[in-house]
Image (cartoon, rainbow, N blue to C red):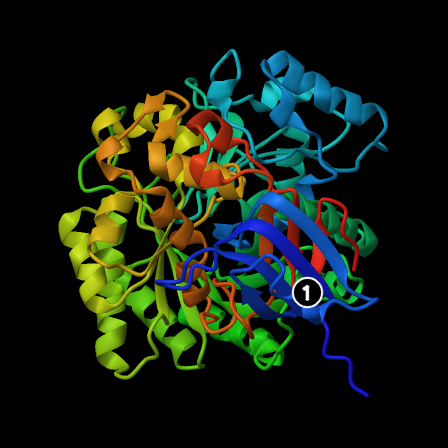
């Protein structure tokens, strides 16, 4: 006789299903990886309880869908799980000492890497370290200091290994830094990163899997059940497959295979050939979403219509020529994949919309959501309206603004920084907008992002309060809208029968928390596919 009972039953103060028009429920039952039923009566599903049912009786708790982080970098977080934790430093002296400590236990000649989730303005000296300073930490190891995804600083040993001299040509779309006297200072930006990073040895597979175990568990602990990782190399994806096989993932992963650093359609075609073996992956935990391009730089090189506040001769960097990007994007969509393109400054947003419009005209009938704008940081009213008219979804990242506002004001000035990530404008237009963190530039966390979008708070105060949205709207950007972005609106984002059992349990109602408390609020439980993945779940 078949047992049709529940594997999991939660009785709670409120189960917010996010089904339009449905009042809060009081009980939720899970069978396998799916929601079996919800009920407005806390005891309304007791008939599904059997000897195998795990019951959580939580009359004061609030249940919500698990959150998506629609633009983040789990791979970076996993790499950083074993790297020098320089994000803990408050001075360059402390920063160097952490590297020096690692050097004492690292065989000479082996690479030393740092974590990436730090900002130089959080250091007392308010600047990046230099190659000469890194040399003082160790001159017997190549050192790679990463800050975010667009900036490296390396020591002299690493420059020498890479063959970088003062005569080395600067790659198009990149920067090789120099000091005031014209000498190399160890800094590399955007397309110059591969000059050194190509030399890094591949980490041991078991170490990488363990990094993913730790990092995905950290995401899940904040309430995030699915990450859309926006820079995954083919090798990274193979490691993700191995991690999934080992049961090491605590979040679902939707991977964007990285075309960053590629400069031609031919190179993109080669990447697509590599991706072909992953086309039909049906694992609900891990799959390829599409391809990631970068059109402009990050904080220091986003392409703007007006010159930078700190340098009136500079307006950022476009990494692709528009015609070449049209050809490259078209190659991807003609193979049936989706595209997400980094466009941060307003000039980059304008150029990207031009590119996407041409691709849409040349390829009529593309499925909705095929072409996505990542960031759209300085998208103004005209650009937002144009994106909506073209049917272009956009991902925004309030935590990035929170953590980098002071850095960005130095480059763009306060007026432009206050206009970044205009959530209110996107929502009011009915845009296909969803939200994430852009870790390691911003801190990931379900309620940290909601708090940021509702307050517009940053490390230097509130910026652009007119762009704030409500709690309910912010919740939607991380749940129902996010599931729509990944093409899974029929599977995730709401809590109703037949949907995947991805849910979070909170000891208190986040909607009723004071702002300061909401920022650092973590769930008591995160379930993905009915499995308890945080804080202590195992699969």
Where disc 1 sits, the SS reads helix
Residue drawn at x 48%, y 39% as measured from the top left: 510
Q: Is residue 468 left or right of residue 201?
A: left
Q: Whole-percent x and y of residue 208?
A: 75, 51
How packed is label 1: few (under 14 Cα within 10 Å), some, or many (20 or more)? Answer: some
**Residue 354 picture quarter:** bottom left
Residue 283 left/right relative to 409: right
- Residue at 64% over, 26% down: 86
Residue where numbered disc 1 is placed: 46
Residue at the bottom extreme, as displayed: 1
On the image, the x and y values in percent for residue 118 come to: 55, 29
Q: What's the residue at 41%, 31% (across, down)?
A: 402
- Horizontally, residue 487 falls left or right of residue 147, namely left
Instruction: Name the spot of residue 287 as percent of width and height, x first.
Output: 59, 70
Residue found at the very far left of the displayed protein: 382
Can residue 236 be seen at all in this image of the molecule? yes
> In the rendered image of this protein, does residue 264 appear above or below residue 427?
below
Q: In the rendered image, which quarter is residue 315 located in?
A: top left
x and y percent of residue 193 in the render?
53, 44
Closest to the observer, 201 or 162: 201
The answer, for residue 203, to whether it is visible in the render is: no
Question: Considering only vertical position in the picture, is 125 above or below 334?
Answer: above
Depicted 492 relative to depicted 468: above or below: below
Q: Nearer the viewer, residue 46 or 521?
A: 46
Q: Quadrant of the N terminus?
A: bottom right
Q: Is residue 188 left or right of residue 225?
A: left
């Amino acid at each position: 006789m078949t047992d049709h009972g529940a594997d999991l039953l939660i009785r709670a103060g409120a189960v917010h299903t996010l089904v339009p028009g449905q009042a809060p429920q009081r009980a939720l039952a899970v069978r396998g990886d799916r929601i079996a039923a919800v009920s407005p009566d806390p005891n309304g599903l007791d008939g599904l309880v059997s000897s195998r049912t795990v019951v959580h009786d939580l009359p004061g708790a609030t249940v919500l869908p698990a959150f998506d982080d629609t633009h983040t970098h789990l791979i970076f977080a996993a790499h950083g799980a074993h790297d020098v934790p320089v994000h803990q430093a408050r001075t360059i002296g402390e920063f160097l000492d952490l590297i020096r400590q690692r050097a004492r236990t690292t065989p000479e000649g082996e690479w030393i890497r740092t974590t990436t989730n730090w900002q130089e303005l959080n250091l007392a000296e308010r600047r990046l370290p230099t190659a000469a300073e890194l040399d003082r930490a160790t001159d017997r190891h190549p050192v790679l200091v990463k800050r975010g995804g667009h900036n490296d600083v390396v020591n002299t040993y690493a420059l020498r290994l890479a063959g970088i001299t003062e005569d080395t040509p600067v790659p198009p779309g990149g920067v090789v830094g120099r000091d005031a006297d014209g000498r190399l200072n160890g800094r590399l930006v955007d397309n110059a990163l591969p000059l050194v990073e190509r030399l890094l040895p591949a980490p041991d597979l078991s170490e990488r899997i363990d990094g993913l175990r730790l990092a995905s568990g950290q995401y899940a602990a904040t309430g995030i059940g699915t990450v859309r990782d926006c820079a995954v190399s083919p090798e990274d994806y193979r490691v993700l497959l191995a991690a999934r096989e080992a049961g090491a993932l605590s979040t679902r992963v939707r991977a964007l295979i990285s075309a960053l650093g590629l400069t031609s359609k031919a190179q993109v075609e080669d990447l697509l050939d590599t991706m072909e073996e992953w086309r039909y992956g049906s694992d609900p935990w891990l799959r390829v979403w599409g391809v990631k391009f970068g059109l402009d730089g990050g904080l220091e090189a986003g392409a703007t219509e007006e010159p930078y506040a700190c340098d009136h001769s500079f307006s950022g960097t476009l990494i692709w020529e528009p015609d070449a990007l049209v050809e490259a994007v078209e190659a991807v969509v003609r193979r049936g994949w989706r595209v997400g393109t980094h466009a941060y400054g307003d000039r980059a947003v304008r150029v990207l919309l031009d590119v996407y419009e041409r691709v849409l005209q040349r390829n009529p009938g593309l499925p909705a959501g095929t072409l996505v704008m990542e960031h759209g940081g300085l998208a103004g009213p005209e650009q937002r309206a144009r994106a909506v008219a073209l049917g272009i979804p956009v991902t925004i990242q309030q935590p990035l603004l929170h953590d980098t506002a002071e850095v960005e004001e130095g480059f763009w000035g306060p007026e432009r920084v206050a206009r970044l990530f205009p959530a209110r404008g996107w929502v009011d237009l009915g845009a296909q907008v969803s939200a994430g963190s852009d870790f390691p530039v911003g801190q990931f966390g379900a309620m940290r992002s909601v708090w940021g979008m509702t307050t517009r708070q940053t490390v230097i105060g509130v910026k652009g309060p007119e762009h704030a949205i409500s709690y309910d709207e912010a919740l939607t950007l991380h749940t129902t809208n996010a599931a729509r972005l990944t093409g899974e609106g029929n599977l995730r984002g709401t809590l109703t029968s037949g949907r995947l059992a991805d849910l979070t349990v909170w000891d208190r109602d986040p909607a009723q928390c004071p702002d300061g408390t909401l920022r650092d609020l973590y769930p008591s439980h995160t379930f993905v596919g009915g499995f308890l993945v945080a804080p202590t779940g195992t699969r």
